[in-house]
């Protein structure tokens, strides 16, 4: 219900998400389609140790600024070589996030938020931070 509320507005909103943890498998392609698994704070810290070299990019499929960013990154030749970017879908549904990631052929890892937004106090999307 909360996700539908945000989608209906068609612009970027801030929200509070409940924290929970889930075991994660790295994002992978299945049948040519990229899958974006859940990402908890503990998994973020384990899979991507904080070294100041990565950029966490929080996005939502319904956010036009986010979609423009994904479109530009997906079409960029630099993007295909840039594995220091980690896309995290926030305030969104898994299917919608994966659809936009696949539409623009974003090659960087992608995940669905599972507590990271709350832990890092992300207030809305689009949002980027160095990790």
Image (cartoon, rainbow, N blue to C red):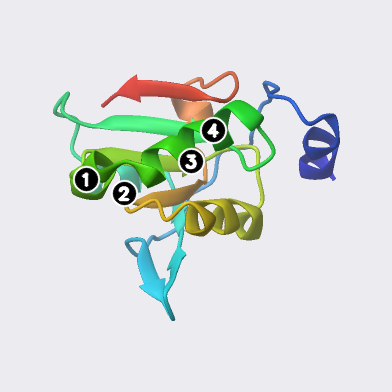
* Mark 3 vs mark 1: in front: 3
Q: 97 or 102, which is in the foreground? A: 102
**Residue at numbered disc 2:** 108
Q: Residue at x 35, y 21 (%)?
A: 129
* Element type where label 2 sits in the image: loop
49 sits left or right of 11 in the view: left
Q: Gap between marks 2 and 1, in whole Å?
A: 5 Å
View extreme (bottom): residue: 31
Q: Gap between marks 1 and 4, in whole Å?
A: 19 Å
Q: Gap between marks 2 and 4, in whole Å?
A: 16 Å
**Residue at numbered disc 1:** 83
**Residue at numbered disc 4:** 68
Instruction: Give the class, few, some or many, for how many residues have Cα within 10 Å of label 2's Cα (few <14, many ≥20).
Output: some
Marks 2 and 1 in Cβ contact (< 8 Å): yes
Which quadrant of the rendered structure holds the N terminus?
top right
* Mark 3 vs mark 2: in front: 3
Q: Residue at x 46, y 65 (%)?
A: 35
Instruction: Choose the circle earlier in sequence order: 2 or 1.
Output: 1
Instruction: Choose the circle earlier in sequence order: 1 or 4.
Output: 4
**Residue at numbered disc 3:** 71
């Amino acid at each position: 219900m909360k996700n539908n509320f945000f989608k209906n507005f068609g612009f970027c909103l801030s929200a509070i998400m409940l924290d929970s943890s889930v075991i994660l498998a790295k994002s992978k392609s299945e049948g040519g389609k990229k899958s974006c698994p859940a990402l908890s704070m503990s998994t973020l810290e384990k899979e991507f140790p904080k070294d100041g070299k990565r950029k966490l990019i929080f996005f939502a499929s319904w956010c036009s600024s986010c979609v423009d960013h994904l479109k530009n990154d997906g079409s960029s030749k630099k993007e295909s070589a840039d594995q220091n970017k980690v896309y995290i879908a926030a305030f969104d549904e898994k299917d919608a996030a994966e659809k936009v990631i696949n539409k623009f052929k974003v090659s960087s890892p992608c995940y669905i938020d599972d507590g990271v937004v709350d832990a890092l106090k992300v207030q809305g999307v689009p949002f980027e931070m160095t990790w």
